[in-house]
Structure formats: structure tokens, C-alpha cells
Image: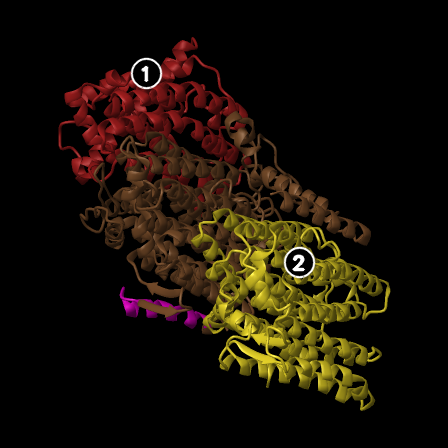
Chain colours: A red, B brown, C yellow
Amino acid sequence: MIFQIILLIMLAYVVGFIYFGLYRNILARIQGRYGPTIYQSFYDSIKLFSKKNTVNYGWMFYLGPIIMATGAVLTLILVPVFSDSDFLRSATSQGNLFVLLYLMVLGPLGNALAVGTGGNPFGVMGVVRGLTRLIGLELPFYIAVVGLIIAANSSDIVHIIDMQKTGGLNIINHPLLFIAAMISMVGFFGESPFDIPGAPQEVYSGPRTEFSGKFLALLMSQGSLFAFAKLVLIIDLFLGGADSLWMLVLKTLAIFVTIIFIGVVYGRYKVEQAVDFLMKIPTLIALLGLARVIWFG
Amino acid sequence: MNSIFLLLNILPILFLYQFGGDLHVSFSLTKDFTLSLIQTPLGTFFAYLSLISFLLVTVSQKSKKLSCNYYALQLLLSFAMLIIVLAGDFITFFIGWEIMTWSSYFIISKSNNIDIKSLQKYILFSLASAFSLIAAIVISYSFANSFDFATISASFKSMPFDIQLTLIILFSLSFFTKAGVIGLHYWVVDTYSKAPDLFSSILSAVMSKMGIYGLFLIYGNIVGYQELKIMFGTILNGTDFGYTLAWIGVATSIIATFKAITQDEVKRLLAYSSIAQLGYIIAVIGFGTTYGVAGALYHTLIHTIIKLLLFINVAAIIAQTGKNRFSELGGLIYRTPVSFVMLLIGIIGLAGMPPLGGFASKFMMYNAAINTKFALILIGMLFSGAASFLYCYKLVYGIYLGHPTSKGLETQKEVPLSYLIPQIILALLLVLTGAFPGAFVKVINPILTQFSLKALPYDGVGIMDSAVGNFNGLFIMSAFVAFFVLILLLISRIKSKAKNNINRFDISYCGEVPSKDTSLHYGFGFGTELHRIKFVNAILKRSTATFYDALALQTKRSSELLSRMYYGNIHNTMIIILLFFSALFFIGVNS
Amino acid sequence: MSLGYYFLLPVIFSFLTPYFKKLGSFTLRGSSILLSFILFVQSIAYTTMKLPQISQFSIKPPLGIAFVLDGYSLLFLLIFTFSAVIVSFYMLWYFKVNPKRDEARFYVFFNMLIAGSIGMILSCDIFNLYIFFEIVGICSYTLSAYNKDKLGLESGIKYLIIGSIASIFIVFAIMLIYLQIGTVNLGLIAQRFHEIDPKISVLIVLMLFIGFGTKAELFPMNFWAPDIYQGSISSVNGLFSSVVAKAYLFVFFHLFYLFGLSSKYMLFVMVIGAITFLVSEFTALNQTNVKRLFAYSTLGQLGILFMALSTNSSETVSGALFHLTSHSISKLLIFLALGILIHHLKSTKISIFGDFKSRFLTIIFAIGFLSILGIPPFSGFVGKILILKGFALSHNYSAIAFILLVSIVEAVYFFRLTAMMLDKKGTKRVVHVGFINYILLCVLAALIVIFGLFPSLLIHYTDLAANALINPTDYLKFALGVGL
């Protein structure tokens, strides 16, 4: 199992960074630039690991990024990566969808603690905006997830994947829930229009303001792990999971590119605008989807 | 003094342990009233909960110079609660309930920052709760001819429907007031925030649970979940009754969560959070399913642990610094590191995150909602949980993180050991309940049997099992610890120089250097954004205070109006007497 | 001791008071204490005897004068004599701290008041009853004017006027009864009351209702009552609240049940009681004078008692009598403690509750308040729950709701006072209670707690009283002289 975990982390690491490089490229092309190489994020990360820290604010500042990374890794191993194989199945069967929903917040909490210790008001502002935005983001996502759980009558992800093998993909069965979840995902990936917490121009990059050196590198790495975990979760829930590595890459890439494309065309919402918006249209869509699940199966 | 009362607090625990479930005492008060104490699994659970809480709080009271009658009143309160949870009939229950009311009233009045208005709020709501309770009790007596739980329960089925409904509403109102359901929570926040700091933990952790016990008693024992189903019919996979109650609970939880975020006083935030957490319990208590009851019980346990931990922690900080507002605190993390870690564990539990016990109880409740297909309820609970991260973070940030807001905070010492010991015990409990969620199944199952519900499956001490999903607390806990240690080791291998213990003004600040006057502690700015969100603002700008203040005003006005009659003119009095006589005579002779 | 001498004793003491005065104040005070003690001990002795007891003067009833003691009057006898003991001890303190007051004037009327009250509850013919009614009245007028200041005299005069009006009604009622039936013996009247022409009987009942209702402080005939309480000294307030008002209430219901009035009247009395309760409690909220405040509280409690006593069910009536006893003790406690407070702080403003510092008095007041509010484990609780239980058994849920809702209003001002006492802010003056008062208040508080914890001690007597009240057959037998 330990071998599998290492393998998975490496996979997520590579895929996550490549996707991130891809993202920077796509963004550049849309903005009429060339952009960096696709491996730029790798280089950045390796460089940062070897650079010295500017400052250190004590042990909580030290532990915060580590908690965040732990959260990301834990999330990763609890999401079933392959639908048919036994790959890491013994780990994934220990958790369920609710564990994942909460684990997704545990990491950011650790980071928030470190940011708070740093004492930079911009960082805290970013954290608070992030948490406020979360109120809005989670609502449509929760409705979508609850809809799926009710439909499957189980909070076990493996069970939800298995259901899709016989009953058809959830994206087809519950398109409204999928749309709502995707809108939330745009926010979870920190994309416009929901990217206020880390906005460089407004809150000075927000939570990451004070981090440097290996901590920033750790944050970047966990970000890519976490992004991969989220993508896998989405394909597990709506696209029936992936039975092979190629399907995994294909499906996650499709989702990721969709999210990027949504992200690049929008401007940035203020935090209250974001929450207001999320509480209206996506929530409504999700509720319609939920009503369909409850009343029409 | 403290050690004597500590001993006195241990005695009832030993006593209860000695009886081991077979306590059955009765005492004849008059020919009509027989007081009886019967030990049920439910009562025993709540009894241990309250007794151990009292014990822990007494431990932490060691460093406070408290008078003998404070301790005596507290002991009386614990005794009253013991009576409540062991009562076998409603008179005993009510006597315990009222002793609880006034003994806590006198303890609260000993606080230094209490005022008459808050005391009045507390006692009037408590009495309103008690009077609604006694009304329900005598009404049920008029049908059952007995105050005995068993007899009333047996005759409940034969009562007319409107009486059944009235009884349920009256009982519920009474217990809702104690638990602080939204609308009836007007007293909660003021009382919790102005009570003696350590006593707030009792109020929030134990006394509000008496309301929950009452609800269990009524829904589970007196009425019976089966009967509720028959009375009210079903919706989706649950009952109409459970659905209504669930909405009340969820509304409570959401509204209180948002109110909590905007508070500046530490204990007010905790008070609102307490209301919100009890909202969850009330949301699932009426489901009448195994998971509903189990979730409510589990969350009762977890909430007691967490609120004791948090209130003791905050009380220690307030005692140490003399400040009770987020805008006056901050930056204590390296001054009081143990306290910080304890609070951190507390808020992780409060937020309901794995791997601590808070998640296990929430998971049980969510499962209950899935089981009954109450999707909106589940979403409401999840939503309120998401919003609660904000106040959890505010709590830890406002006190321990960020910048100290005054000189005194920079030289603060760690809080006394007497405060820390109970906190450490509670934090360990939280960790244990998180790692071994299955252990609690054995406690719950007898209670479920008492309510004639199906028992929970038991798959081992680390696993929480349910029909719609399970999780292995032990695995998640150990995986978390393992990864944490691993990553820590890896990162610490990467040598990178950094200057430690730097000047706290050395931060990235848009190229400028903040001076000593720059306000860097963001703590009191928290939650202002929420006002700009329409939906949240709609909640925040409304308050039940408007209603209750208007009620108080109208009472005062009518009182003034009526007292004008008594202005002491003897001629008019005579004329009124004569007129009254004539009027009565006229009516009397003509009819 | 025969009943006749029993009530004559205080009269004799009262007439001897001027001579005692000559023998010195020690004799004067001692005699009063001795008298009340004898009366109390004797009334306890009555509890062991077979009831009813009768004492006749030369001619057998129904023609002669007779005194009858049944279960109902026994309870009141105990309350009255107990209150007398407490008050006479309390006056030791009062005259010690107010050495210039005229002691004899107090004791004459005090003894006479006790005599009159006892006479009122024992006498079994309506004319004697009227005489005692007047005796009690006159003593109350003078006692309420004991403070010869503006307020005291005002209250004396007002009481006199209202008392006279009430007397007129009663005299007329008695006259009409005599004209119709030709007797003043209660037994005979009870037997033949239904023979009276209904229109006349309505008039009689109404006149009695107005007469006794005015004195028993029922709405809307109670606009004078708070003024009386305001003008008199605290011990007299205590007497008014726990003896005088209760004596009138006794007669009211004694006649009510003896005459076997129809349920229409009962409903009427219940409604009037409810209105009294409501109006008084609401009015009390707005008071700034403590004596008036507790006066209104007394009116309110009388309202509950009228509601509960007019139900004709032995359960409720027994509960009401329990409540009455507990209320008498509590109000006595409150008024006596209040007297101490007023003496030390020289004010009757409500704010005095925030200005004193004495843990003992705080506890005493708290016990009194909690008991009146009906909160366990104090005696008021048992009374209240018995009343509520009685209403519940007759499925009168609106009464239950009403009592409980208005009780919350009552709690507002009682707990406002409590909160003021417990408030730590402001300057506080230390109040020394004094040894005698310490003992007295302890006894009263202990009784409240004991009756709360072991109500069966008292319920025995209230049950007896309730049965005697509702089924007066035994009483009638004796009143008619049949059993002799």
C-alpha cells in the first residue's frame, strides 16, 4: 500500500504540475502572450525548495503548510483513482464523501493558522475572504453532492462509481447537478470570477503573502496534489471514474480545461458579489437538479 | 475549599457507578405526589455527562478564589441536574428543573459584569420555560391521573389529538427555550457572555443539554417515536414531525452561525456557536430513526466536550489578560502555547473536521438525514457547517494569532495549570472520540433499545458504520498523523536559513513599514463583509430583540394604564363600588 | 379551653392593656406575647381534638349564640394565631428601635384585632359575625393610622370610609336575610336559603359579595387597598396581608358554600378573581413604593385564591388553602423583613433593595419571593401545583394558562427586586437584623422550606379544611344544635 501511495503522490505531482503549466500556457495564449514552458511550475518549485526563507514566525508558521500538505495527501489517498482496479482500494474504503468534503477544508485551515501567525493583515484578509467565499461556493457543491448521495443512497464514492456503471453516467442523469458542481469547482480552483482571496492586486496575494522558500514550494506542491484530487473526485462523481491511466488523464484534462476556459473569460467578483451570485443561479440550478433526484429518482 | 468540593463532585459519580443502572428510589411527598428516581440508559448517559463536566469545571476553578456558597450553589445545581436526568416522574423532574433554574440564577448573579437586564432576561425565559413545562405536566395529569412517566406514556395514545398536539408543543417550547432555539434564544447570548467565565461552560455544555434531555424524554419516552409517526404521518422517508423539527433546528443553526461570526465579544461568539450546535441536535432529534437518535446523542457528547474545552480556555485567557473582546486580544500564541493548542483542537472539533470527534458526530447526523431523504435539511446542516469555519477561525485568530493589540499581551504568561488540566483531558477525549468513533456505539445502543429502535451495527472500535456509508476513524487519524510526521521530517531535512524571532512589524506591507500605531490585528474587522451579502445581511439585521423589547414596552404601557386606576381617590372608589353593585344587581335580577 | 373563652381571652387582654401599661412596658409586651402564645398553643391543641367543636352560651343553638370550630376554621385559626405570635415578637424589636411610640395603643388594637378575627371565623350566627367584622374593621382603621403622619392618617380615614360602606352592604344583607327567614343562625340560613325569592336572594348574595369582597380586596372594589398598605407600619401590613384579608376571605367562602350557591356565581367569582389577579400583577410592575408593590402582590395572590376557592372541588380548594397558608407565611416574612429594611434605610422607595448589604436578608427575601412565585422546593410550589392540578382535573385549561401567564408578569417584579439585591454595584449600607428578628425570620423561612419539602404535614389540615368547607354537613349539624 505504501508503494501505491508513493506512486499516486508522484503521479498527482507530475500531472498536477503539468496541468498547471498548461494552464499558464492557455492563459497566455488567450491573452496574446507566449507564456512559459509547460514545466515552468516544476522549475519554480524546485528552485523554491532550495532557496532560503525570508522570515520565520515560529512553529505554527512552520506547521501550517505541513498541515495543509497533509490534508492534500490524505484527500488524495481517499479518492478512488481507478474505478475497476484494487489500486489503493483498502485506503479509499476507509473514508467516504463527507470525510472528503471536510478534509478539503482541513488543509486550508492549517494554512490559515500559519497566515494568522505571520500577522500580515493582507494574508488574513485573504483567508477571511476565502472563508466567506466558501459559504457561497459550498452551497451549490453541497447540493450537487447531496443529490448524488441521495440518488445512490450512499456516501461511499466507490458505490457511486459502481452505480454509474449500470445506471449511466451522472453527468447525463443529473446534468443540472453537474453544472452546479462545475461552477463551484471554478471557485475551488481559485479561478475567476471567484479568485478574490488570492488576488495579487487587492490583498497582496492574500494567504501566500508571507511565505517564501520551502514553504511556498510546499504550498505549490500541495496545490497541485490537491488540484489533482479534486479533479479525480469530480470524474468519480459525475463521469464514472477512470478505468485506465489514459482515461484518467483524458477525463481530468477535459474537466480542467473546461474550468480554465470558464475562468479566463471572466473578471473578478468582489467577495460579496461572488457569494450573492453563487447563492442565486448555481444554487437554483442545483436545487432544480436535487428536486429531480428526489421526486423523479 | 476547592478540594473539598472536588471531592463532593466525585461522590455522585461513584454513587452512580456503584448502582450501575439499578437505581430505583421513591419517596412519598404527599398522597398525590410520589417522587421517584429511576435510572434509564438515557438518564445515565446525561448524568455522567453532567457530573463529569461539573468535576472538570471544579478542577479549573481552583485558581479562582471562589466563596463557599458559590461552590455550594454549583453543587446544588449539579444535584438538580442529577434529579432531572434520573427522575421517574414529572414532579421530580419539575422540582429538579426549577432548582436548576434558581441555583444557576444565583450563580450567574455573582458575576462581576452581570447587569439587572440580563439577569431578568435569564430568569424570565427560564420561568417561561418552566411554566410551559408545568402546564404540559398538569394537562397530561388530567388525562393520566398520575405524574409517572410510564403511566403518562401509556395513556398518551388515548388522548384526543388536539391535547396530544398541545402537550408536544408545550413540552417542546419549554425545552427549546433551554436549548436556545432561534426565537427563544434571546436570553442565551447575554447570559452566557455575562455569567462568571467558568460558569458559562456549565451553562453551555451542560444546562442546555438538559433541554435536549427533555426533548429525548418527550419524543422518545413519553410520546414515543412510533406514536409520533402515527400521529403526524410521513414525508419522504421520515415523519412530518421530524421534518418540521428539522427545519427549526436547521434555521437555528444557520442564523446563529451567521450571528456568531459578527460578534466581537469572545463569549458571545461561543454562545451563538452553542445555539448553532444545538440547532443540529434539534434538527435530527425528531427523525425517530436509529441514526437520528444516535447522531443527536453523539453530538450531545461532542458538543459538551467542545464547549467545556472552549469556554474553559477562553475563561483562562480572560482571567489572565482581563480582556474579553477580539479587538482587545491577539498574538498570544507564543505566550500561551498550550492554551493555543487546546483551543485549536477545540475548534477543529467544533468545525467538525476529521480526524477529531466532531466529525464522527456530524457524520452520524448527516447519515440520518440521508436515511430519511431529507436532502434540504442535510444541505442546511452542511451549509451552516461551512459558515461555521469562519467563526472557528475568528476564535483562534482573534485571541492567539495576529498581532497583540496592547502592551500587556506581549508579556503574558501561560495560564495556570488548573485551567490546563481539564482542557488537556477534554482534548484527549476529542482525539479519542475521533479515533474510536465505534466505541460510542456501545453507549448508544442501550438508549436506542430504550426507545425501541434498531441498534447500531458495531464493526470495531475504530469504525463508524451506517447503512449509507462508513468511515474508519482510526485509519484517518493514524494516516493523518503519519503523513504529518512524514512531511514534517521531509521538510525539516531541507535546510534553509531563516531569521527567527523577528520584529513583528517586519511583514510584507505593500512596500511600507507599519509603525506601532498601525492597526494590524484584523480580528475585529471579521465578519463585516458578511453585511454586504444580501442573504446574510437579511439575517444579521433582524433580531428577536425587536420583538421582545416591544413586548416589554407594551407590558410596561399596559401596566401604566392599569395603575392609573389606583390613584387613591376615595370618592371615585366609592362610586365605582356602588356602580359595580348596581350593574351586578341589574344583571342578576334580570337573568 | 372552651371556644367561648378562647376568643374572649384576647378581648380581656385588650381591655387590661391600660393596666399593663402602668406596670411597665415589659409587662405590656410580655402580656401580648403570652396571650398570642396561649392562643397558638391552644389552637394546636385543637388539632388533636375531634372536630367540629362547639361552645354555646346558655341557650342551645339555633336560638342561642354559639361558636363552632370545624376543619376549615381550624386552619385559619392556626394561621392567625401563628401570625400573632410572630408579630408580637417582632414588636419587641420594633418598640426597641422606636422607643417613643405609644405601645399601649398598638397592643390594645392588636389584641382586639386577633380577637375579632378569631371571632369572625368561629361565630356561627351571622349577626355576631357582623359584630366581629366591625371589631376587626375598627382595629384595622386605627392600626393603619398608627403612624400619625399624613400617609397614616390618610390610610386610616380611607379605610374607615370604605369599611363603613362595606358594613352598610352587609347590614342590609343581614337585615334582608332576617326578614326573609327570621333567623340569624348560619345553620338555619343555610338550610332555608333556597326558599327565599330568587330576586331577593340575588340581592342578598350581591350585597354580601360587595361587602366582603370590598374588604377582601377584590377588583374593582380594591382601589383603596394599596393606600392602606402604604400608610401603615410593616408589621401591620403583615397582619393585613396574612390575617385580616384572610379572615374576610374565610367568611366570603364560608357563606358562599353554606348557601350552596349555583355554579353561575362560582364562575362569576372565578372571573372576578382572575381579573383581580391580572390587574394587580400588571399594576405592581409599575410601582416605585415597596409597600404598595407588595400590597398589589397580595391582591394578586388573593385573586388566585378566589379563582381556586370557587371551584367546588376539594382538590383545588385544598390546594388553594395550602397556597393561602404558604402565602400568609411568605408575606409575613416579606413584610417583617421589609420593616427592618425600611427602618434602616429610612425610605420606602423600591431602590432600597439595591442599597442594603446583608446576606441574611437577601436569602430571606429570596426565599419569600421564590415561595410566592411557586418555585420548588418552597411551600408556594406545592400550593400552586395543587391548584393547577385541580384545574387540570376539571379540564379548566384556560385557568391554568391564565395563572401561568400572569405569574410570569409577577416574576418580572419579584426578580427585579432580587436582581437589585444581588447587584454588586453602588454603595451598600450594612443592615443589622437584630437577634429577635433573626430568629423570627429563620422560623418563617424554615416553615416555608419545611412545608415545601414535606407538604404532607400541612396537606392533612388543608384537606380537612377543604372537606369541611365544601361539605358543611357536620358544621350544619352543630350549628343547628342537632348533635348536642
The residue pinned by badge 1 equals A257
| C378 vs A55, nearest the viewer | C378
Whether B20 is among the magenta residues is: yes
Element assignment for label 1: helix
Q: Chain of mark 2?
A: C
Instruction: Give, as a three-letter code, the residue at label 2.
Output: Leu
> Crowding near pointer 2: few (<14 within 10 Å), some, many (20+)?
many
State the image coordinates of residue C373 (x, y, percent, origin top left): 57, 59
Is residue B303 among the parts visible in the rendering? yes
**Secondary structure of the magenta portion, mostly?**
helix
The residue at the point 64 percent across, 76 percent down is C65
Percent position (x, y) of residue B97?
46, 58
Name the amino acid type tagged 1: Val
Give how far apart the Cα atoms at labels 2 and 1 are. Answer: 96 Å
Say whether residue C371 is visible.
no
Depth check, mark 2 against mark 1: the one in front is 2
Q: Are marks 2 and 1 in contact (CB under 8 Å)?
A: no
Q: Position of residue C110 (x, y in %)?
A: 73, 76
Question: Residue B266 magenta-drawn?
Answer: no
Report crowding for label 1: few under 14, some 14 to 19, many 20 or more residues within 10 A (C-alpha): some
Q: Are marks 2 and 1 on the same chain?
A: no
Q: Nearer the viewer, residue B100 or B25?
A: B25
Q: B72 above or below A80?
A: below
| Residue at the limit of the structure toward the top, as seen here | A32
Residue shown at 54%/83% (left/top)?
C45
Instruction: Point out the stretch of residues depicted in magenta.
Output: B5-23
Instruction: Pick the quarter of the image with the N terminus of chain C.
Output: bottom right
Q: Which mark is residue B262?
A: none
Question: Image quadrant of residue C228?
Answer: bottom right
The disc at residue C208 is 2
Q: Nearer the viewer, residue C138 or B107?
A: C138
Can you say whether C398 is above or below C145 in the image? above
